[in-house]
């Protein structure tokens, strides 16, 4: 009987070991597949992958209504963080697609957060946003605090931040943020 119990224990232990090993292999394959799909979509969209798993720098900024935003409070959401200005033609060119993506995914764990780097306190920004009926969140960074934290060299610049708060991609220049590839990327990440 002791021998039977020992064999049962060894068999049970082997099953647990192989189940654990199988689970790790499946998880690794899924992670590898997710990363490959993400990188493939980044390439199609023209997004540079950020591979060092660096946390996005935190900031405090106000939106057009005076509400204070802190980036770390958005953890758990996929964030597309876009730096722009009202005087920047390429920035204005991509705004309709930003609005479209915002409207399509605003009910998911996704936010397209824009940061105006206009030097004047919000009036020009507010006029521009109201004139075009944009509904995405607009934060004001007239002193360039977030601009410097993210080391932005030109606008528009968009950073993609995963649900854990890590910067995983960067796009410099305008994009069609409503393209099928971007929609697939947001669906994959949320």
Image: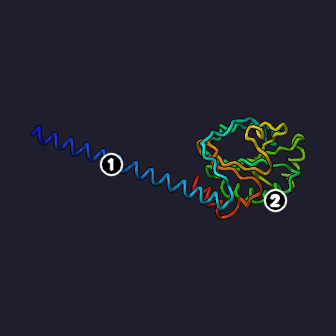
Counting from the top left corner in percent of width and height, residue 19 is at: 33, 48
Q: Is residue 94 left or right of residue 164?
A: right
Q: Is residue 90 left or right of residue 69?
A: right
In this view, the residue in front, 173 or 142, is: 173
Q: Secondary structure at mark 1?
A: helix
Q: How many marks?
A: 2
Q: Secondary structure at mark 2?
A: helix
| Pointer 1 residue | 19
Residue at image x 16%, y 39%? 6
- Can residue 61 be seen here? The reply is yes
Residue at image x 15%, y 40%? 5
Residue at image x 59%, y 56%? 39
Counting from the top left corner in percent of width and height, residue 99 is at: 75, 56
Q: Where is the N terminus found, in terms of image quarters?
A: top left
Counting from the top left corner in percent of width and height, residue 40 is at: 59, 59
The picture quadrant where one finds residue 73 is top right
- Can residue 111 be seen here? The reply is no
| Pointer 2 residue | 93
Q: Is residue 153 left or right of residue 110?
A: right
58 over 168 or under it: above or below? above
For this orientation, the residue located farthest to the left is 1
62 over 127 or under it: above or below? above
The picture quadrant where one finds residue 147 is top right
The picture quadrant where one finds residue 9 is top left
145 over 98 or under it: above or below? above
- What distance separates the C-alpha of mark 2 from that of mark 1? 52 Å
Residue at image x 62%, y 55%? 186
Counting from the top left corner in percent of width and height, residue 62 is at: 78, 38
Tag of residue 87: none
């Amino acid at each position: 009987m002791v021998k039977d119990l020992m064999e049962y224990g060894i068999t049970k232990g082997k099953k647990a070991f192989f189940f654990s090993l199988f689970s790790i292999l499946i998880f690794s394959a899924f992670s590898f597949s997710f990363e490959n799909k993400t990188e493939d979509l980044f390439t199609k969209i023209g997004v540079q992958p950020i591979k060092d798993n660096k946390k996005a720098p935190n900031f405090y900024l106000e939106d057009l209504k005076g509400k204070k935003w802190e980036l770390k409070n958005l953890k758990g959401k996929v964030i597309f963080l876009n730096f722009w200005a009202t005087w920047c033609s390429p920035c204005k060119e991509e705004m309709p697609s930003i609005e479209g993506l915002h409207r399509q995914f605003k009910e998911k764990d996704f936010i397209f957060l824009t940061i105006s780097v206009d030097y004047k306190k919000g009036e020009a920004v507010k006029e521009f946003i109201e004139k075009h009926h944009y509904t995405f969140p607009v934060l004001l960074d007239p002193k360039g605090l977030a601009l410097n934290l993210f080391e932005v060299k030109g606008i528009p610049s968009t950073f993609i931040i995963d649900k854990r708060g890590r910067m995983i991609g960067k796009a410099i220049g305008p994009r069609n943020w409503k393209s099928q590839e971007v929609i697939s990327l947001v669906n994959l990440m949320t």
